[in-house]
Image (tube, rainbow, N blue to C red):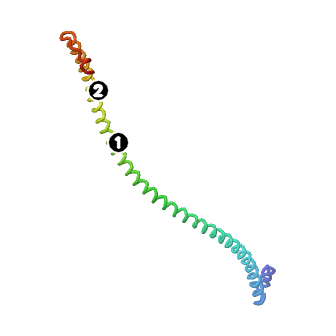
């Protein structure tokens, strides 16, 4: 047991210089680790810089797309208004055509009716000429050519 007690005494006989050297070595080892960590952070920073640069280019492209989309939206709005106006004009034209069709149908019916009446009158005149020739011996066709 005495040996164990004496081992403790030897360990406790570390001088302040020894302790300072030990702490110094610990700091040196820690500094070396931090140098490695700093190098890794530098490489990570470089990667982030590249990513930032790429994102900046993407932002520029998106701004261009946004500008073009704004122009497209304006064009679509203008086209919508123009389309509405064209539809209104087309409806008016269709109404006018329907009205003209009704008028033309009525005119054609009257014309057809007149043609029928004319055929009937022509047949009646033919009969009257025949009666005049047979009964009164008057030839209307000969009178017409004098």
Disc 2 crowd rating (10 Å Cα; few below 14, some 14-19, many 20+) is few
Q: Nearer the viewer, residue 20 or 102?
A: 102
Q: Nearer the viewer, residue 101 or 69?
A: 101
Identify the mark nearer the N-term, 2 or 1. 1
**Does residue 92 appear anywhere in the picture?**
yes
Point out the frontmost of discs 2 and 1. 2
Residue lying at 46% horizontally and 58% vertically, measured from the top left: 75
- Spot occupied by residue 97 in the image (x, y as percentages of width and height): 33, 40
Residue at the top extreme of this rendering: 134
Q: Nearer the viewer, residue 146 or 43?
A: 146
Disc 1 crowd rating (10 Å Cα; few below 14, some 14-19, many 20+) is few
| Helix, strand or loop at mark 2 | helix
Q: Answer with left or right where residue 38 lies relative to residue 128.
A: right
- Spot occupied by residue 46 in the image (x, y as percentages of width and height): 68, 72
Question: Which quadrant, please, contains the C terminus?
Answer: top left
Residue 87 in the image: above or below residue 3: above
Residue lying at 54% horizontally and 62% vertically, measured from the top left: 65
- Mark carried by residue 112: 2
Q: Answer with left or right where residue 75 lies relative to residue 58.
A: left
How far is disc 2 from disc 1 in space, using C-alphas? 26 Å
- Spot occupied by residue 117 in the image (x, y as percentages of width and height): 24, 23
Residue 57 in the image: above or below residue 26: above
| Helix, strand or loop at mark 1 | helix
**Does residue 13 appear anywhere in the picture?**
no
- Mark carried by residue 94: 1
- Spot occupied by residue 133 in the image (x, y as percentages of width and height): 22, 12
Residue 34 in the image: above or below residue 110: below
- Mark carried by residue 59: none
Residue at the front extreme of this rendering: 146
For residue 134, which quarter of the picture?
top left
């Amino acid at each position: 047991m005495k040996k164990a007690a004496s081992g403790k005494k030897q360990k406790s006989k570390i001088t302040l210089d020894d302790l300072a050297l030990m702490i110094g070595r610990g700091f040196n080892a820690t500094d070396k680790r931090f140098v490695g960590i700093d190098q890794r952070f530098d490489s990570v920073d470089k990667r982030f810089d590249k990513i930032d640069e790429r994102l900046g280019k993407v932002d520029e492209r998106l701004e261009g797309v946004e500008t073009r989309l704004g122009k497209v939206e304006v064009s679509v709005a203008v086209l919508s208004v123009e389309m509405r106006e064209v539809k209104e004009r087309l409806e008016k034209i269709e109404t006018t055509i329907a009205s003209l069709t009704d008028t033309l149908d009525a005119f054609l019916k009257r014309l057809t009716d007149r043609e029928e009446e004319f055929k009937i009158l022509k047949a009646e005149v033919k009969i009257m000429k025949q009666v005049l020739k047979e009964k009164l011996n008057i030839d209307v066709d000969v009178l017409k050519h004098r």
